[in-house]
Amino acid sequence: MKISDEELRRVVLSNVQAQALFQDNQELFAEVIRSAVTKEDVVAVGYRKRQLQVFQQLLENDEYFKTVKTQKQCNSEAVWQKFFEKNPWIFGYGLSYIQLSTLDDRKLEQVVHGHTVSEHGKRVDALLKTRGVISSLCFVEIKTHKTELLKSRPYRVGCWSPSDELSGAIAQVQGTVVLATETIKSKLALTDDVGNPTGEEAFNYMPKSFLVVGSLHEFVGDHGVNQERYRSFELFRRNTNSPEIVTFDELYERARFIVHQNET
């Protein structure tokens, strides 16, 4: 069968692209051969690497963040909510999102009032469940990487108080968990869009909660770390059991580890 000139050009171009792809990603292809990973695995790794770059840009490039914020026509917190909704893997392999309903086009902002989690009430930025033989609920409140962690002036010499934004966010998460405990009770049975049981369930015994807020860069000056301010923050969050406080830069490093953990 004779191949047309146009078909031949397409074949040659495809080969050139394949060679370039191999040259640029020899280590990845070697890992594919060693691990016998699937095509879907390769696609997932590539996707996560691209999303990790987006994460870094959102953290470090103010102009990029403003552009995304303008394009999505939302506030700063919603930018992060949409990003994490698109990338549930960032919170770790042990957690997964519970997508129960869409509220004002914000899927992460789930209602947590009522047994069906479908009535109006207190909302949480991310409703998650642990992965395992038995799943448990987990609540996440998402602020922004620019949220201040400590007040600008010391409470006493060498002692810095948490910012109003940080204190308020902690109270918000704690209130959400208490309300969920009172209304969801011990177990949440999940349903689909039309109310049919999915067979999934998540238990609600002393649920874990997380607060993603601020950045440790707040404590770094031109000549190093402000130890008194950093010490005040660490002492405060280490003695705050619920929610667990995680900064955006720490979450980024966790995501970077997930993406690069198998690289040599």
Image (tube, helix red, strand yellow):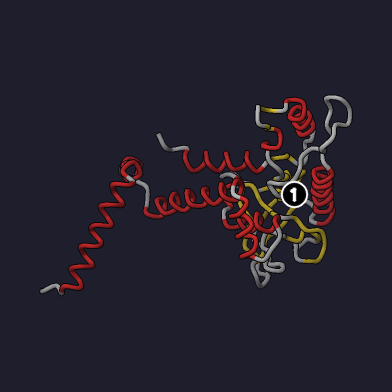
The residue carrying mark 1 is: 204
In the rendered image, the vertical position of residue 223 relative to residue 28, given as above or below? above
> Residue 20, position in %: x, y?
28, 52
Q: Is residue 31 toward the left or the right of residue 118 in the image?
A: left
Could you tell me which residue is drawn at 42 percent across and 37 percent down? 263
Query: Which residue is situated farthest in the left direction here?
Result: 1
Q: Where is residue 185 in the image (x, y as percent from the top left)?
A: 80, 53
Residue 98: quarter of image = bottom right
Residue 36 to residue 70: above or below: above
Q: Relative to the observer, which residue lies in front, 134 or 211?
A: 211
Q: Residue at x 15, y 74 (%)?
A: 4
> Residue 148 or 205: which is nearer the viewer?
148
Residue that sits furthest to the right in the current view: 156
Q: Is mark 1 on a helix, strand or loop?
A: strand
- Name the image quarter holding residue 67: bottom right
Crowd rating for badge 1 (residues with CA inside 10 Å; few <14, some 14–19, many 20+): many
Q: Which residue is drawn at 73% across and 39% down?
A: 244
Amino acid type of disc 1?
A: Asn
Q: Number of callouts in the render? A: 1
The quadrant of the rendering that contains the N terminus is bottom left
Q: Residue 237: x percent and y percent?
A: 76, 34
Q: Is residue 261 above or below residue 189?
A: above
Q: Which residue lies at the image location 59% right of the left edge and 42% below the top edge?
A: 252
For the C terminus, the image quarter is top left
Q: Where is residue 34 in the image (x, y as percent from the top left)?
A: 32, 40
Return the residue nearer the eye: 222 or 12. Answer: 222
